[in-house]
């Protein structure tokens, strides 16, 4: 996995630079996401290394429907020529990190024992915005195994306020 990320990093940086220079960060996010999802499909993945399939046909296959930015098509063609299309999921993920950094946005995932209401999410978002000094995009998930509380994963920072973790710490303290 780390080998794929190492190979994908320069392509992600190039994609980000191209998108930024042509004023299309959100459009490139969508296009890269589509292409990454396409190459992740087992049927498409089986075609990627086929010697009889032209690069242009591969680009057509994984390009988003509708009119596609010619610069984006050239980017995909470069990936196809260098046999790097299988790296698109890693390229897309790294691109999103670069975009979030440039737009000063922190993406955080909140996993709670029960679904959080809008007011709780707004309060949490405001609190995280104050802590990180950036805009915050939240995604949510529910995991009843947490028993209570929540775990916030903001990339390099993980805040675990779950009852499950608190109980584990208490049990550990009592065992010693």
Image: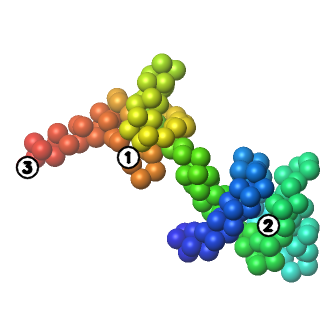
Instruction: Answer with left or right where residue 87 lies relative to residue 121.
Output: right
Q: Earlier in the sequence, mark 2 or mark 3?
A: 2
Question: Residue 28: horizontal and vertical position, in percent?
Answer: 75, 53
Picture quadrant where residue 98 is located? bottom right
First reached walking from the N terminus: tag 1 or tag 2: 2
Q: Residue at x 54, y 46 (%)?
A: 104
Crowd around label 2: few <14 · some 14–19 · many ≥20 (10 Å)? some
Q: Quadrant of the N terminus?
A: bottom right
Find residue 101 and report its horizontal and vertical position in percent: 55, 52
* Residue at position x 45%, y 45% in the image: 154
Residue at horizontal 91%, vertical 79%?
52
Disc 2 and disc 3: Cα gap in Å? 58 Å
Q: Residues within 10 Å of mark 3 (few under 14, many from 20)?
A: few
Residue 40 visible: no
The residue tagged 1 is 158
x then y, percent, for residue 128: 42, 35
Q: For the residue labelled by badge 2, is the local secondary structure a helix, a strand or a loop?
A: helix
Name the residue: 76% across, 50% down: 24
Please report contact status of discs 2 and 3: CB closer than 8 Å, yes or no. no
For mark 2, what is the residue? 75
- Which of the 4 quarters of the picture holds residue 89? bottom right
Q: Give residue 176's mark.
A: 3
* Left or right relative to 23: residue 137: left
Vertical relation: 66 (above or below) 118: below
Q: Can the viewer see residue 79?
A: yes
Q: Could you tell me how far apart the alpha carbons at marks 3 and 1 are, in whole angstroms?
A: 26 Å
């Amino acid at each position: 996995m780390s080998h794929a990320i190492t190979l994908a990093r320069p392509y992600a940086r190039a994609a980000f630079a191209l998108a930024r220079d042509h004023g299309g960060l959100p459009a490139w996010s969508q296009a890269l996401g589509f292409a990454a999802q396409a190459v992740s499909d087992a049927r498409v993945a089986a075609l990627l290394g086929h010697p009889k399939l032209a690069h242009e046909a591969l680009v057509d296959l994984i390009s988003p429907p509708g009119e596609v930015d010619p610069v984006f098509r050239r980017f995909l063609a470069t990936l196809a020529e260098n046999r790097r299309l299988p790296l698109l999921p890693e390229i897309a993920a790294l691109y999103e990190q670069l975009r979030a950094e440039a737009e000063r946005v922190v993406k955080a995932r909140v996993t709670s024992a029960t679904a959080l209401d809008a007011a709780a999410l707004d309060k949490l978002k405001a609190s995280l915005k104050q802590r990180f000094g950036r805009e915050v995009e939240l995604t949510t998930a529910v995991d009843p195994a947490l028993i209570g509380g929540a775990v916030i994963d903001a990339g390099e920072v993980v805040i675990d306020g779950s009852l499950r973790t608190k109980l584990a710490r208490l049990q550990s303290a009592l065992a010693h």
